[in-house]
Image (tube, helix red, strand yellow):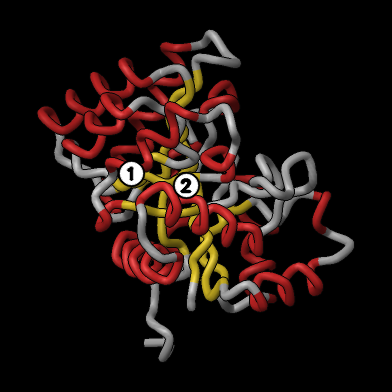
């Protein structure tokens, strides 16, 4: 059984002392590929070094909405340059809107739209962070679709209602679930997880955050994506092998990841 963790942050300091053991555990858990997200372009060098070290790692480049104030006239050109400099870059992001922790809504929207345009121009999917901003996100994406073009992508660490989930499915997006789906009180997310078509479903850890049950409260890590898969299998009434196979296929399709033969 093979799994893909579609969203990690293993460049964070909390992992630096035991990266080799971390890799051993994710391989034992069946994780064959990881997509490393990017909070800001300054992280790119450290993420690239990790990809040099761990061949199963692919990565993104972008600016997180909570860092939107760091955007300058040179940021878009910098992201573009980094994205085309390494063929292991498989996405733009993470980017999006976060109205829970910040009030600079206009700045976030501008920065997000600029990264959507880059994703379109580079023919890369976008990794979207959306917290307490589903209505604004839907409106912005619909406007971009009408005015520019559709963009491929994933709503990562999804926490929306089934109705909101359908909005983004209708726009062609994949929906990725993190360890939050395993939490006892996450009934809304669990209901969403039941309705996602099998060909649009992804799994992730978003490590080191949001460790799933039974590891809740501990440092999260890629090996724990298996618990997310197990929970989704239970919610959807299928085997974990079915979830693993489908989410692996979906991640390979969205991010254009190489198959097991390395092609």
69, above or below 106, in the image = below
Neighbours of disc 2 within 10 Å: few (<14), some (14-19), many (20+): many
- Residue 26 lies left or right of residue 84; in this view the side is right
One can see residue 78 in this view: no
Which mark, residue 231? none
64, above or below 179, in the image = above
Q: How far apart are marks 2 and 1 (CA)?
A: 8 Å
* Whole-percent x, y for residue 2 in the image: 48, 75
Secondary structure under tag 2 reads: helix
23, above or below 230, in the image = below
Corner quadrant of residue 247? bottom left
Q: Among all residues in the image, which is located at the extreme right?
A: 17
Tag 2 near tag 1, CB within 8 Å: yes
Instruction: Write the residue at 40% across / 27% down.
Output: 160
Q: Among all residues in the image, which is located at the extreme bottom?
A: 261
**Toward the viewer: 5 or 1?**
1
Instruction: Write the residue at 54% across / 34% down.
Output: 64
One can see residue 121 in this view: yes
* Whole-percent x, y for residue 140 in the image: 26, 22
Which residue matches tag 2?
A: 79
**Toward the viewer: 89 or 228?**
228
Which residue matches tag 1?
A: 118
- Residue 45 lies left or right of residue 68; in this view the side is right
Instruction: Write the residue at 35% across / 21% down.
Output: 134
């Amino acid at each position: 059984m093979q799994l893909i963790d579609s969203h990690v942050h293993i460049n964070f300091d909390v992992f630096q002392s035991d990266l080799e053991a971390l890799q051993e555990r994710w391989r034992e858990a069946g994780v064959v590929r990881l997509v490393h997200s990017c909070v800001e372009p300054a992280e790119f060098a450290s993420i690239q070094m990790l990809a040099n070290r761990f061949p199963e790692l692919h990565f993104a480049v972008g600016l997180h909405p909570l860092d939107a104030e760091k955007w300058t006239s040179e940021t878009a050109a910098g992201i573009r340059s980094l994205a085309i400099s390494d063929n292991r870059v498989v996405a733009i992001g993470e980017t999006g809107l976060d109205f829970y922790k910040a009030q600079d809504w206009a700045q976030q929207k501008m920065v997000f739209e600029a990264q959507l345009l880059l994703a379109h121009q580079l023919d890369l999917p976008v990794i979207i962070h959306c917290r307490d901003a589903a209505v604004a996100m839907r409106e912005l994406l619909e406007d971009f679709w009408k005015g520019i073009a559709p963009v491929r992508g994933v709503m990562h660490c999804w926490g929306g209602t089934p109705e909101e989930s359908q909005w983004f499915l209708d726009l062609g997006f994949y929906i990725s679930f993190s360890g939050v789906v395993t939490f006892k009180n996450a009934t809304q997310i669990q209901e969403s997880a039941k309705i996602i078509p099998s060909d649009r479903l992804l799994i992730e850890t978003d490590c080191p955050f949001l460790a799933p049950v039974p590891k809740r409260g501990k440092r999260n890590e890629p090996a724990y994506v298996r618990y997310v898969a197990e929970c989704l299998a239970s919610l959807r009434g299928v085997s974990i092998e079915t979830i693993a196979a489908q989410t692996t296929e979906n991640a390979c399709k969205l991010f254009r990841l190489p198959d097991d033969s390395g092609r």
